[in-house]
């Protein structure tokens, strides 16, 4: 006999959000999402299970509380951020402003092996970046296979807190940069000077002007002939 019972449709693993009796105009929230994350599928998934608020966040993409924030990165974005040094500035900002920040790496280290773009970083460079963020800054890196898994990770963090909609202190204003940070950024503008070398130059007990003059006069041993020539061309260039 053929069964006439209708099959139940598959439902999402995330439970539906409960009504709190709050109106949409109130600022109470379980999660604050950065406005720029709307290009991802993650916010739409979270909207179904949590009371969310959108804002322009200076640090992170998903702020769970005053202490907890997640920065989501696709694997290709992680590679690009490592290459230009942006990942380390982001990590510094997260660590200085939150007690428990975390990175969510969406796609994982085998992203390129699944038919996507070729990796930009060697395995050694990739592992080095993980160690710098995980050990150097003390920020965990949580792997995620896709947007649904990312949403589950964020949702679980909210559930762990037993969090009901509450006001969240949204950190939308960045701290003023220190003189040391400004010096490192200036050094990193020159060709061939990455975050590591910029930090080494910053630690020299000389003024910024003195260090730049020393580089121009080939008195800094950290540069090869080709690198010195490029920097000299910039320092001596007249528009």
Image (cartoon, rainbow, N blue to C red):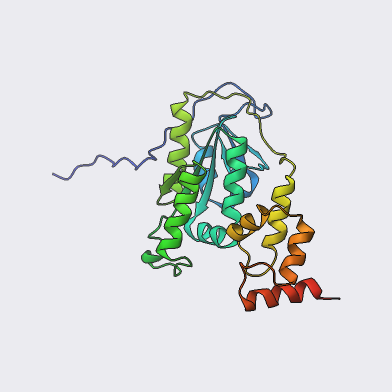
Q: Is residue 16 visible?
A: no
Residue for point 39% across, 68% down: 115
Residue for point 63% across, 49% down: 36
From this viewpoint, which residue is outermost toward the top? 21
Residue 224 screen position, x and y as percent: 61, 74
Report the quarter where the C terminus lies: bottom right
Which residue is more in the foreground, 166 or 136?
A: 136
Q: Tell me if residue 173 comes above or below residue 85 in the rendering.
A: above
Q: Tell me if residue 16 comes above or below residue 190 in the rendering.
A: above
Residue 180 screen position, x and y as percent: 70, 48
From this viewpoint, which residue is outermost toward the right? 239
Residue for point 85% across, 76% down: 238
Asked where in the image residue 171 lies, by quadrant, the reply is: top right
Q: Tell me if residue 234 comes above or below residue 5 in the rendering.
A: below
Asked where in the image residue 59 lies, by quadrant, the reply is: top right
Residue 175 is left or right of residue 141, and the answer is right
Residue 138 is left or right of residue 213, and the answer is left
Residue 117 screen position, x and y as percent: 46, 69
Q: Is residue 74 visible?
A: yes
Report the quarter where the N terminus lies: top left
Asked where in the image residue 14 lies, by quadrant, the reply is: top left
The mark total stands at 0
From this viewpoint, which residue is outermost toward the left? 1
Residue 163 screen position, x and y as percent: 51, 24
Residue 15 is left or right of residue 229, and the answer is left
Residue for point 65% across, 52% down: 203
Q: Tell me if residue 137 comes above or below residue 182 in the rendering.
A: above
């Amino acid at each position: 006999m053929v069964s006439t019972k209708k099959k139940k449709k598959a439902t999402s693993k995330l439970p539906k959000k409960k009504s709190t009796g709050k109106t949409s105009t109130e600022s109470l929230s379980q999660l604050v999402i950065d406005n720029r994350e709307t290009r991802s599928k993650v916010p739409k998934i979270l909207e179904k299970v949590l009371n969310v608020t959108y804002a322009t966040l200076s640090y992170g993409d998903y702020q769970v509380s005053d202490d907890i924030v997640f920065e989501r990165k696709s694997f290709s974005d992680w590679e690009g951020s490592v290459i230009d040094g942006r990942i380390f500035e982001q990590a510094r900002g997260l660590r200085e402003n939150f007690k428990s920040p975390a990175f969510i790496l969406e796609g994982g280290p085998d992203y390129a092996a699944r038919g996507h773009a070729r990796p930009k970083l060697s395995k050694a460079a990739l592992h080095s970046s993980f160690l710098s963020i995980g050990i150097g800054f003390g920020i965990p890196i949580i792997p995620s296979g896709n947007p649904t898994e990312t949403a589950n990770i964020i949702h679980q963090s909210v559930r762990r807190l037993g969090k009901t909609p509450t006001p969240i202190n949204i950190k939308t204003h960045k701290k003023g940069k220190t003189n040391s940070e400004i010096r490192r950024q200036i050094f990193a503008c020159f060709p061939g000077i990455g975050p590591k070398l910029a930090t080494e130059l910053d630690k020299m007990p000389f003024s910024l002007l003195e260090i730049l003059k020393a580089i121009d006069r080939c008195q800094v041993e950290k540069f090869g002939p080709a690198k010195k020539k490029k920097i000299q061309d910039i320092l001596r260039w007249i528009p």
